[in-house]
């Protein structure tokens, strides 16, 4: 069945059969809800049907949470990597919103529950939080405008690399230990050896000088380098 020919009503019979198989009485288009299922005085199960994942679907499902804690979104099951990626991402979104997720395979009417509704309890990553706070604390000034895209961001690591480049610009080829001392960058050797930005050339073991890219970086970041030099 081509996506353009799919209708929300195509999802109803498989979802109804799924819920009836679990002992629910199921009715369509009750109030604002696409599907309502009731069983033995429990909270009603509400299912919102759409022909694909959309912001409208999630808005409607969230609104239905004012009626019941047990709300599912339901879409046709697609095929291929793109759909599997979308399913994974939207399953994560549903979990965060406290929603359940059902798909229907239209070729044979298989309705599958991928996620049941449950309260979302976010778990913070101590490692990621520590990395965020370290970046905040070690970055000098506020060199980036929030919301910037398609532009090289000035990270604390890039600032340290600029400090190293500035030292080489002033002193020429220099031992890594001396660069670390003069720039105040303890990891100067690792930064110049990794050479992520292509700013450094190794003259011989432990001795580095600026590459042509490094000299261009000095010219392009003169203002930032002056700020970093003043800070150190």
Image (tube, rainbow, N blue to C red):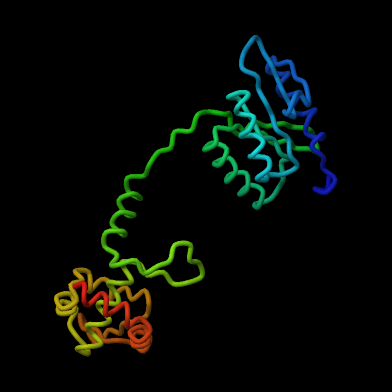
Residue at (38% x, 84% y) in the render: 220
Quadrant containing the N terminus is top right
**Farthest residue, direction top:** 40
Asked if 210 appears above or below 64 in the picture, the reply is: below
Tell me residue 141's x, y (percent). Answer: 30, 67
In the image, 231 versus 182, the foreground residue is 231
Asked if 130 appears above or below 109 in the picture, the reply is: below
Residue at (69% x, 16% y) in the render: 38
Asked if 86 appears above or below 20 in the picture, the reply is: below
Residue at (37% x, 87% y) in the render: 216
Residue 197: name its quadrant.
Answer: bottom left
In the image, 99 versus 33, the foreground residue is 33
In the image, 225 versus 215, the foreground residue is 225
In the image, 144 versus 157, the foreground residue is 144
Q: Is residue 169 left or right of residue 52?
A: left
Asked if 200 appears above or below 69 in the picture, the reply is: below
Residue 32: name its quadrant.
Answer: top right
Residue at (67% x, 26% y) in the render: 46
Tell me residue 204's x, y (percent). Answer: 23, 86
Tell me residue 31's x, y (percent). Answer: 75, 25
Tell me residue 128's x, y (percent). Answer: 35, 50
Q: Is residue 190 left or right of residue 64?
A: left
Label tally? 0
Quadrant containing the C terminus is bottom left
Residue 6: name its quadrant.
Answer: top right
């Amino acid at each position: 069945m081509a996506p353009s020919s799919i209708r929300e009503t195509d999802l109803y019979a498989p979802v109804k059969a799924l819920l009836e198989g679990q002992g629910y009485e199921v009715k369509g288009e009750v109030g604002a809800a696409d599907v309502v299922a009731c069983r033995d005085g429990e909270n009603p199960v509400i299912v919102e049907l759409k022909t694909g994942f959309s912001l409208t679907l999630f808005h409607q499902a969230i609104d239905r949470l004012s009626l019941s804690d047990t709300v599912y979104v339901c879409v046709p099951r697609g095929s291929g990597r793109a759909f599997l990626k979308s399913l994974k991402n939207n399953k994560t979104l549903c979990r965060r919103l406290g929603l359940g997720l059902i798909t229907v395979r239209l070729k044979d009417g298989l309705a599958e529950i991928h996620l049941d509704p449950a309260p979302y309890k976010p778990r913070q990553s101590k490692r990621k939080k520590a990395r965020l706070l370290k970046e905040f604390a070690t970055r000098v000034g506020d060199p980036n405008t929030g919301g910037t895209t398609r532009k090289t961001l000035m990270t604390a690591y890039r600032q340290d690399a600029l400090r190293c480049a500035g030292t080489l610009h002033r002193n020429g080829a220099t031992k890594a230990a001396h660069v670390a001392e003069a720039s105040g960058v303890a990891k100067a050797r690792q930064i110049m050896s990794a050479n992520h930005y292509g700013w450094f050339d190794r003259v011989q073991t432990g001795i580095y000088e600026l590459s042509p890219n490094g000299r261009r970086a000095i010219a392009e970041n003169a203002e930032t380098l002056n700020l970093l030099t003043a800070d150190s």
